[in-house]
Image (cartoon, rainbow, N blue to C red):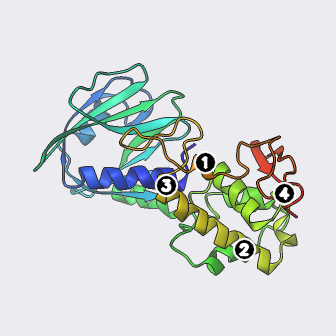
Amino acid sequence: MPELPEVETIRRQLDDALAGMRIESVELLKSGREEPVGKEFVACLTGKKIKNIERRAKLIVWRFVDGSVMFTHLKMTGRLVLEDKRYKPRKHDRAVFKLKGKKGGKDLVWSDVRQFGFMKCLSAEDAKKVLDAYGPEPLEISAQELADRLLKPKTRKIKVALMDQATIAGIGNIYADEALFRAGVRPTRPLGELTAKERLEIAQQVQALLKLSIKHRGTSANDYVDASGKQGKFLKLLQVYGRGGEECVKCGTPIKRIVIGQRGTHYCPKCQK
Ligand SMILES: [Zn+2]
């Protein structure tokens, strides 16, 4: 699933390309994952001018000049790709947005193989309620403030806490595993057992990792591509995620794969205490 760096990469590209443009038309190819459904969705977007495109956690937040908002969540396999003029609809495409601006037109295609992603139109007020329920953005607070989010509940495992969107926004399986490896802390450790030094180290590693991954336009571990249709380049920098059974890059011990909170979790039994 795209996490903070992947969604941020797409967000930046969309904002650069589309801010100030008007949605001329919306062609809904496959209905069912948009809100309101069908014609109403098309009607609520057609003619709207994009003010800017923001991100909160893993949500892409479209802000329109009239004050209304649209959320896009890519979930497992959703894609938003800017296509050239030769675009022809493909099997998993759900919608085509035709946009016009001072510099000409652009087509944005929403596609989704697994169909868990969604788009939702809502008022600024309703949008605020959803956005306020998330925890802080990890790159907008200090490392110490981030570390202080990892204090309770004391019995909660650190891996679960890192992935809880109300604790910290935007982190998922990949960056939780990677940050814990870099910090030398086992994903199974309960919060109550972590030292202040370990918590701070985890927070600093989370921040460093997210920044580094954004620089590489994210991780293409599965289906993720950015808004230009290209894969992110962070995959080759992963040290534990997806490497179960392979040798640890630091000590050579086989990386363990266990399940925590229904998610595959990877760690080095020697380097991580
Ligand atoms: Zn190791």
Q: Which mark is residue 251?
A: 4
Q: Tell me which residue sits at (80%, 42%) in the image.
A: 246
Q: CA distance from mark 2 to mark 4?
A: 20 Å
Which residue carries the number 2 mark?
A: 201
The extreme top residue here reads: 91
Q: Amino acid at mark 1?
A: Lys
Disc 3 residue lies near ligand 1 with CB under 8 A: no
Q: CA distance from mark 1 to mark 4?
A: 18 Å
Q: Are marks 2 and 1 in contact (CB under 8 Å)?
A: no
Image check: 23 left or right of 114? left
Closer to the chain start, of discs 2 and 3, is: 2
Residue 264 x %, y %: 76, 42
Disc 2 residue lies near ligand 1 with CB under 8 A: no
Closer to the chain start, of discs 1 and 4, is: 1
Q: Amino acid at mark 3?
A: His
Residue 30 x %, y %: 38, 23
Q: Amino acid at mark 2?
A: Glu
- Mark nearer the viewer, 2 or 1: 1
Disc 4 residue lies near ligand 1 with CB under 8 A: yes
Closer to the chain start, of discs 3 and 1, is: 3
Q: What element does badge 1 sit on? A: helix
Give the quarter of the image for residue 141: bottom right
Q: Amino acid at mark 4?
A: Cys
- Mark nearer the viewer, 3 or 4: 4
Q: Tell me which residue sits at (79%, 58%) in the image.
A: 250
- Mark nearer the viewer, 2 or 4: 4
Q: What element does badge 4 sit on? A: loop
Closer to the chain start, of discs 2 and 4, is: 2
